[in-house]
Image (tube, grey):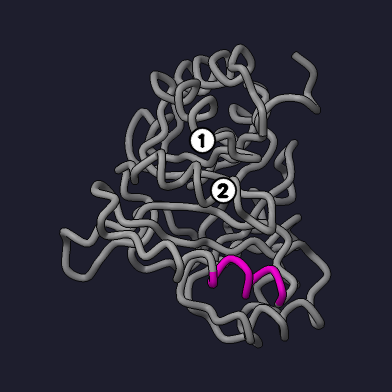
Amino acid sequence: MSKESKCKVKICGTTSIQDACFAADAGADFSGVLVDVASSERSLTTKKAAKIASASPIPTVLLLYNRTTSDIQTTISIIQPFALQLLGQETPQQVEVLKKVITCQIWKSVYLPAGSPENVDMTSVREQMQAYRDAGADFLLFDSVDISVDPPRYGGTGKTCDWNVAAELISDSPLPVFFAGGIRPDNVRAAIETIAPYGIDLCSGVEASKGVKDKGKLERLMEQVNCSDYFG
């Protein structure tokens, strides 16, 4: 299967140059680094993230959570990522401003509740998707929010949302969508064939321990991605 025809893969929560290289060697398309995200065990300082980004063989996506526009500009100027992923409750208005003042791509996370589909307000999610597209976002990412904990955990939950709900929303999306939440080597092929996203995004599913990637799991993941029937 050619590189262009496969589902794209972003390996998130990268905490070392070695792990960025593992992801690249396995055939992943993007490496994600989190900076100053208090809720994540995989969060890095700006300085460490910049070192990883400069050495990574594949494009780096910088993940930030509820930061001011000026803070975002400063962090981007140091790390110089391929893309900025906004993880929090950043508004379409902030995305619109950022689009005018930064040159990298803007990806926006949209959250679906882990587990049962009756919790999903489909109209609200569709309105969010359109609003971020209108504001200038380049990609969307569907991830799960775990509302069983206090405070709720946005992303990095290791839990899946309802795939049929995700598939319906992705089929209607005004932008290409990466799908995250509970993806592992043993379910990635089914996820791709059920949901048909532009790309998949995962972290804990290819780790040996929190923040440390497992080379074997990465290789098994990419084998499954490459043999999937992809219609995204």
- Residue at coordinates 46% horizontally, 32% vertically from top-left? 213
Q: Reply above or below: 20 against 151.
A: above
- Image location (x, y in percent) of residue 184: 40, 28
- Amino acid marked by disc 2: Ile
- Image location (x, y in percent) of residue 166: 46, 46
Q: Is mark 2 on a helix, strand or loop?
A: helix
Apparent side of residue 116 relative to residue 97 in the rendered image (left or right): left
- Residue at coordinates 57% horizontally, 86% vertically from top-left? 68
Q: Reply above or below: 115 against 145.
A: above
**Which is more N-terminal, label 1 or label 2?**
2
Q: Which mark is residue 170?
A: 2
- Residue at coordinates 33% horizontally, 42% vertically from top-left? 160
Q: Place residue 174 in its image quadrant.
A: bottom right
- Amino acid marked by disc 1: Ile
- Image location (x, y in percent) of residue 55: 72, 43
Q: Residue 148 carries which label?
A: none
Apparent side of residue 198 relative to residue 211 in the rendered image (left or right): right
If the image is split into quadrants, where does the C terminus sit?
Answer: top right
For the image shown, how many numbered marks are present on the structure?
2
- Residue at coordinates 33% horizontally, 58% vertically from top-left? 145
In this orientation, does residue 15 appear? no
Q: Mark 1 points at which residue?
A: 195
Measured in 3D between alpha carbons, the distance from the residue under mark 2 to the one under mark 1, in whole angstroms, is 7 Å
Read off the magenta span.
127-134
